[in-house]
Amino acid sequence: MITFNANIAGVPCNVAFADLPDESQRFVIEYGIKQYLNDGAAVSLVFTTKERKGEKKTDAEILAEKQDGVTERLENLRTGEFTRRGSGAPKMTPEEKERYSIVQARLDAMAKATGKTLPKKTGKDANPELLAKLHEAMYTKHKDAIDKEVARRLKANEKAEDVSDILEMLG
């Protein structure tokens, strides 16, 4: 059973999700997913580290960073794997993110079709080594098709990012 237990502004909040009416469940899910994805799009308008610290980002840089954040959170929702800031994990390039997403979707479909359970990257029953081997095997077997899909998605993202002139009209 999914429960929410917190103390907010001194008010004990203990909610059993299954006990909520369908409309409340739907609202919580829609609101929660929307808020979670919107949080992924929250970015600084200026660089905060390295050689460009304090420099204003271009509209295209801001858009790309927002899209990366939302894409990452969508992948978190799909995989059930969530990390906190500063986890030490290296950031993936857009190409690596797309490749990971495609391979994971293929593995998920394979597992669902066969009734098998995939190993998790993190958590109590994690087996990141086996998951990495499965990723590698899936990618190796379907490299051409996966690379083609990665290129298609990146090209589609580039087209979506090419709106800086339109964004300038907003001021």
Image: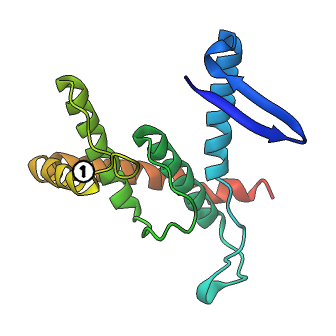
Q: For the point 60% across and 86% down, which residue is it?
A: 50
The quadrant of the rendering that contains the C terminus is bottom right
* Mark 1 Cα-neighbour bin, 10 Å: few <14, some 14–19, many ≥20: some
Q: For the point 73% across and 82% down, which residue is it?
A: 54
Q: For the point 69% across and 14% down, which residue is it?
A: 20
Left or right: 8 in relation to 169: right
Q: Name the residue under label 1.
A: 131
- How was the colour assigned to the protein in this rendering? rainbow
Inspect the image, locate mark 1, and give the three-letter code of the amino acid beneath it. Answer: Leu
Q: In this view, does 88 lie above or below 111?
A: below
Q: Which of the two residues, 44 or 127, is positioned nearer the viewer here?
A: 127
Q: Position of residue 83 (x, y in %)?
A: 51, 56
Q: Which of the two residues, 150 or 33, is positioned nearer the viewer here?
A: 33
Q: Which of the two residues, 49 or 87, is positioned nearer the viewer here?
A: 87
Left or right: 24 in relation to 113: right
Q: Is residue 49 above or below residue 159?
A: below
Q: Position of residue 170 (x, y in %)?
A: 78, 53
